[in-house]
Image: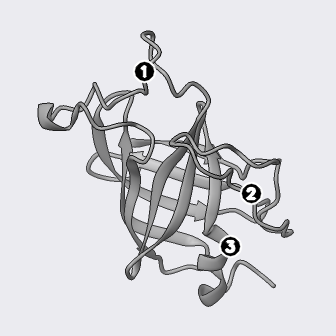
Amino acid sequence: MTCFTRNIALLCLIGLAASPPGAGITIAPCGEKLCGTITWLKAPLNAEGKPKTDIHNTDATLQARPICGLPMLGDFVAGDTAGAWTGGFIYDPEKGETYKSNMHLQPDGTLVVRGYIGISWLGRSQVWTRPPAPLPHCCGGEPHAPPPPSRFWAPR
């Protein structure tokens, strides 16, 4: 199976991708599009020992929502080339800001996620990888097992 055909590219992305620093994002279809939710945190509790909340959000009405379960990616549609996902957004809970975003699945199995304002070259990219072992869900519940290895989306 190759992840670089349009019909298979979605299947190669679905699952858990670890994103720096210290978060795990579950990527899954949401209707006709692709979305991602924070489902693992290296440090899920704040200094008071309570679950972290979206305290940096510019919308004060959203600052009490938990970081665990927070939609971080959304509205991605398949791009013109296989492995590319465009037209989406990425939310940065550390800054409380939402940016336009594109994602590209690389042949080495990494996912390059780019967030930007206005045009893509005015942005920043991160390289995400799948975790090598199951990660416990930050909201409780069962750990997320990594998907079966594939030569295009392998753990690093």
Q: Secondary structure at mark 1?
A: loop
Q: Amino acid at mark 1?
A: Lys
Where residue 49 appears, as percent x and y from the top left, is 47, 15
Q: Which mark is residue 50?
A: 1
User: Along the line of sight, which residue is nearer the eye, 103 or 62?
Assistant: 62
Residue 148 picture quarter: bottom right
Residue at 72 percent across and 78 percent down: it is 3
- Residue contact at pointers 2 and 3, CB within 8 angstroms: no
Q: Which mark is residue 145?
A: 2
The residue beneath circle 3 is: 12
* Amino acid at dot 2: Ala
Q: Nearer the viewer, residue 111 or 30?
A: 30
Dot placed on the residue nearer the N-terminal end, 1 or 3 = 3
Helix, strand or loop at label 3? It is helix
Residue at image coords 31%, 53%: 119
Task: In the displayed orientation, state which residue is furthest to the top.
Answer: 47
Of labels 1 and 3, the one closer to you: 1
Residue density around tag 3, few if under 14, some if 14–19, many if 20 or more, within 10 Å: some
The residue depicted at 78 percent of the width and 82 percent of the height is 2
Q: For this rendering, which residue is in front, 103 or 22?
A: 22
In this rendering, the label closer to the viewer, 1 or 2:
1
Total numbered labels: 3
Q: Between marks 2 and 3, how big is the CA–CA gap?
A: 15 Å
Which callout, 2 or 3, points to the residue nearer the camera? 2
Q: CA distance from mark 1 to mark 2?
A: 26 Å
Residue contact between numbered discs 1 and 3, judged by CB atoms under 8 Å: no
The residue type indicated by label 3 comes to Cys
153 up-or-down from 116: above or below: below
Point out residue 57 in the picture as x, y percentages from the top left corner. Answer: 24, 32
Left or right for 22, reference 153: left
Q: How is the image coloured?
A: one colour
Mark found first going from the N terminus, 1 or 2: 1
